[in-house]
Amino acid sequence: MAEMDTSSGGGHKKGPGVKKGKKLSTRVDLTPMVDLGFLLITFFMFTTTLAKPKTMEINMPFKDKNLKDEEKNKLKASAAMTILLSKNHRIYYYEGIGDDPENTPELKATTFKAKGGIRDAIIKKKEMVAGMKRAGTLTAKDEAMILIKPDTTSTYSDLVNMLDEMSINDVKVYAIIDISEIEQGFIQETESANNSQ
Amino acid sequence: MPKAKIPRKSTNIDMTAMCDVAFLLLTFFMLATKFKPEEPVVVKTPSSISEIPLPDVDIMLLTVDKTGRIFFSIDNKIKRKALIEDVNKAKNLNLSEEEMNSFAIGASIGIKFDQLKSFLHLSPLEQTEVEKSAPGIPVDSTVLSPDNELAQWIKSGRNTNPRLRICIKADGDAAYPKVQNIIKTLEGYKIFRFNLITNLKAVPEGTAAYAEKHSTASAK
């Protein structure tokens, strides 16, 4: 390829009196260059970040005192489901928005597992809302609404997983809301009830 | 019997082709590479199915590590200079020009204002060392609290560059109240839209998002 024929034999004979110049090989040993090339490749491969981090956009509920009452009216308890994130990645959920301290809602415990976890509960809720829309108890504008209330013992990954479930299950209306003391009480009650069993 | 003459073959292999390949790959990696940004702490972000790529410019990054320490950084050197000038004025830190330059070329910040002056005196190498054991930027659930130093950083950041997109990069194991404080602080500035940095994970089968993704893919 890039070599030149430098062998003295075999070529045509030079005429008499023509001095033979000393022929130097034009062939360069490229091995060190290749070494260097691969060294640099290795360096770049280790320092590079090919997988760019992705982001998730979230919109927090607009907090304005003038708006609050109006917003609250929009929220229909029958279309809502409240999810409480608790410690050890445990989830408690109940139907409705839990605004009645007298009437303790029934808390169901679940986890993030793919089958039989919170995802199934969300899908069920969506179906229920769709059914109620057909029956006419909810107007066509209503959507399944999920309130996410992370407890102080939950971790950030719980929140992200929960938000992710929202996009996985195509829940259009959801909000992250601070947990109330009443709901923290619910969790404690349920936990102590489970322990005594 | 005459010996059969085996022609001597040269053991030299032509390296040219290999060299070509090596440098071709090298060029590719050099052009495709983006150096890992300097990070004071190791953060393992949770995964989500979101596919929105992180923008390269105009981002304000709030890093939260496992233990809940908060680090603040913005991307552009010129903007960083403007930011530290703004902070300096607002908090009367008496930083010299040199110290402000040191901030501009530095990475993220995770220390209190009263330690900032001595911190910026250190060499970049020492700064990274200090950052590792830094306490993080103090934060509080209300914006107006004087202890909420993160609020000042965010405010100054937005003063210098109103287009800043706020990204929270938190460790999956970080306790929620820490993140909640940041969100509360942002809400105090009427910022209701921000980004959470996550890793990409596959969409689970048999869900609404999966159906949607595959219907749009087949429609194309």
Image (tube, grey):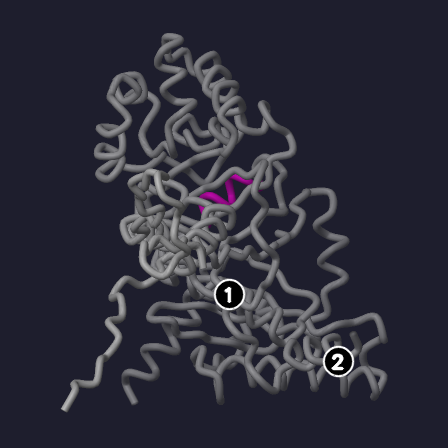
Q: Quadrant of the C terminus of chain B?
A: bottom right
Looking at the image, do the residues carrying marks 1 and 2 touch, with CB atoms under 8 Å apart? Answer: no
Task: Give the main secondary structure of the magenta stretch.
Answer: helix
Q: Which residues are magenta?
A: B180-187
Residue A79 quadrant: bottom right
Say what amino acid the circle numbered 2 marks.
Ser
Left/right of residue B106 with respect to residue B216 in the rendered view: left
**At x 74% / y 47%, what residue is drawn?**
A67
Say if labels 1 and 2 share a chain.
yes
Q: Which residue is mark 1?
A: B200
Q: Which mark is residue B218?
A: 2
Q: CA–CA distance between discs 1 and 2?
A: 22 Å
Chain containing mark 1: B
| Residue A43, visible in the rendered structure | no
**At x 36% / y 46%, what residue is drawn?**
A26
| Image position, residue B207 (x, y; %) | 62, 82
Chain containing mark 2: B
Numbered disc 1: secondary structure: strand
Numbered disc 2: secondary structure: helix
> Vertically, is A6 above or below B100?
below
| Image position, residue B208 (x, y; %) | 66, 80
**At x 49% / y 52%, what residue is drawn?**
B28
| Image position, residue A147 (x, y; %) | 59, 66
Left/right of residue A195 with respect to residue A68 in the rendered view: left
* B86, A121: nearer the viewer: B86
